[in-house]
Image (tube, coloured by chain):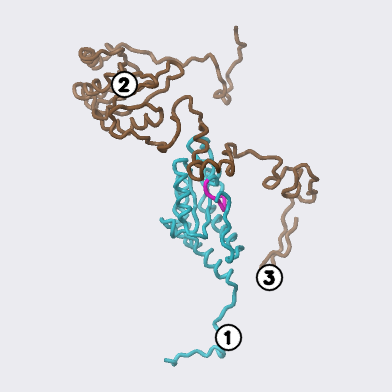
């Protein structure tokens, strides 16, 4: 059994790296941000393009999941109608904490050009938003940059505090 | 009283000119005898039904009827006169003019290559008979008509709102419905998800995304009067005159430290 025992002291140090719990947990969190497929309108096309092979969201650890229970980040891509507002809140509540929201495109940010009775004027009326991504529709690079910014934000967090309830909760 | 004459030849601004006295041109009504097929069809209809008017507009036969005979007439048009497709069905709001809705049925005959429009008018509180038993495509159209105008359709198999949620208040396609929604519509998602007491927490809808509150120094900085973040808007501004945006940015990158050590304009 012990034929291949390694002499650590002889071979240049122990295979041990010291770090903080924060750093290692954040390293894991930021590099596997699984996103909920929340395509509501034309921004969804850009979101799909971001996930496809040319832009390859998988490089950032973003894998789209069709279930809120497996997702960490909700990318709201498109116009949120008032009829649908109830369901976006329900899906947000079903996501396991910690969870984050990226509001993608003008319609999700402010209602955009749909200044009508049937459109929610910004998803932040219904769910708390971490990152607003401007554009109509934002290009895939922009969405990737938004995810990188979210990663940057998460790296600053400490894991010992429970995610503080944001606005609206 | 005569209005002063102002030449309206600026093409760029043409769409912004408004003329209060402008009257939309009426589409001329042509006699049904001009067209052989429509003439014989109208004759056959008149033998069986008591119709109000029949004429040709834009190459289509228009039949105005009493709303009570709508189903019978559509049966007749489908079975006897070969108008076998219901292309469209909807209503027009004429409540302001005459207190009525105009309901129209747009039919197409594949064999004759002709189109017929059947029109009828009902009062606001009246109901119309469903034509779902004649054309199955009327199902969703009648539901949409009920959803958008509030016209009740009798004997419809499943009369329920089609586009708007079931608990929606009001009928959006009526001329009296405001485009940005009435009070129930503006607070719809808040009332439904959080409850009415949350209206004060969330606040009213921001309908103008370009709106900037001058007194809000947390989110905005007034140009050339930049005060510290969160300070009152009328407090002493910070001196920012050394910054020159047009000057080239000189950056020095230290390879060993792998970061910018100097950044200056």
Magenta-span inclusion, residue A130: yes
Q: In the rendered image of this protein, which colour is used for chain A?
A: cyan
| Residue A145, x across and y down, in percent | 56, 56
Q: Main secondary structure of the magenta part?
A: loop
- Residue B97 lies, with reference to residue B1, above or below; the image says below
The reply to the same-chain question for discs 2 and 1 is: no
Residue denoted by label 3: B257
Seen in the image, is B89 located left or right of residue B173? Answer: left
Instruction: Provide the residue span drawn in magenta.
Output: A126-132
Hey, which quadrant is residue B131 in on the image?
Answer: top left
- Residue B92 lies, with reference to residue A19, above or below; the image says above
* Extreme residue in the left direction: B80
What is the chain letter for disc 2?
Answer: B
| Residue A114, x across and y down, in percent | 51, 37
| Residue A159, x across and y down, in percent | 57, 65
Q: Residue at x 23, y 27 (%)?
A: B84
Around disc 2, counting alpha carbons within 10 Å, would you say few (fewer than 14), some (14 to 19), or many (20 or more)?
A: many
Tag nearer the camera, 3 or 1: 1
Q: Residue at x 72, y 48 (%)?
A: B230
Residue denoted by label 1: A13
The reply to the same-chain question for discs 3 and 2 is: yes
Around disc 1, counting alpha carbons within 10 Å, would you say few (fewer than 14), some (14 to 19), or many (20 or more)?
A: few
As measured in the structure, the alpha-carbon distance from the residue carrying label 2 to the one carrying label 1 is 89 Å
On residue B117, the disc is 2
Q: At numbered mark 1, what does the secondary structure look like: helix, strand or loop?
A: loop
User: Which of the marked residues, 3 or 2, is nearer the chain's N terminus?
Assistant: 2
């Amino acid at each position: 059994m012990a034929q291949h025992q390694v002499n650590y002291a002889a071979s240049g140090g122990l295979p041990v790296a010291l770090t903080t719990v924060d750093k290692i947990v954040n390293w894991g969190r930021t590099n596997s941000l699984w996103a909920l497929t929340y395509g509501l309108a034309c921004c969804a096309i850009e979101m799909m393009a971001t996930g496809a092979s040319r832009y390859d969201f998988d490089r950032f650890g973003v894998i789209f999941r069709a279930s809120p229970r497996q997702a960490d980040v909700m990318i709201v891509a498109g116009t949120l109608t008032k009829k649908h507002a109830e369901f976006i809140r329900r899906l947000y509540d079903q996501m396991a904490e910690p969870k984050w929201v990226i509001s993608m495109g003008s319609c999700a940010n402010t209602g955009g050009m749909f200044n009508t009775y049937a459109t929610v004027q910004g998803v932040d009326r219904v769910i708390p938003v971490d990152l607003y991504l401007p554009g109509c529709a934002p290009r895939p690079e922009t969405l990737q940059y938004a995810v990188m910014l979210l990663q940057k934000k998460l790296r600053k967090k400490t894991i010992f505090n429970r995610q503080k309830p944001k606005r609206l909760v | 009283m005569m209005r002063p004459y102002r030449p309206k030849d600026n093409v760029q601004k043409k769409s912004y000119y408004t003329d209060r006295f402008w009257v939309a041109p009426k589409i001329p009504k042509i006699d049904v005898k001009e067209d052989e097929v429509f003439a014989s069809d109208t004759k056959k209809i008149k033998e069986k039904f008591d119709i109000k008017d029949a004429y040709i507009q834009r190459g289509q036969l228009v039949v105005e009827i009493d709303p009570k005979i709508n189903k019978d007439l559509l049966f007749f048009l489908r079975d006897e006169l070969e108008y076998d497709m219901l292309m469209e069905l909807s209503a027009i709001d004429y409540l302001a003019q005459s207190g009525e809705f105009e309901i129209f049925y747009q039919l197409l005959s594949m064999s004759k290559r002709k189109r017929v429009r059947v029109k009828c008018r009902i009062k606001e509180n009246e109901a119309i008979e469903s034509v779902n038993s004649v054309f199955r495509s009327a199902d969703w159209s009648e539901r949409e008509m009920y959803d958008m105008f509030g016209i009740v359709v009798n004997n419809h198999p499943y009369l329920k709102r089609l586009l708007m949620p079931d608990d929606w208040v009001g009928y959006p396609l009526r001329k009296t419905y405001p485009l940005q929604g009435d009070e129930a519509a503006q607070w719809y998602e808040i009332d439904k998800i959080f409850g009415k007491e949350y209206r004060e927490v969330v606040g009213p809808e921001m309908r103008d995304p370009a709106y900037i509150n001058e007194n809000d120094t947390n989110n905005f900085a007034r140009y050339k009067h930049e005060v510290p973040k969160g300070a009152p808007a009328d407090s002493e501004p910070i001196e920012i005159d050394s910054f020159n945006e047009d000057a080239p940015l000189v950056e020095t990158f230290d390879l060993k430290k792998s970061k910018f050590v100097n950044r200056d304009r």
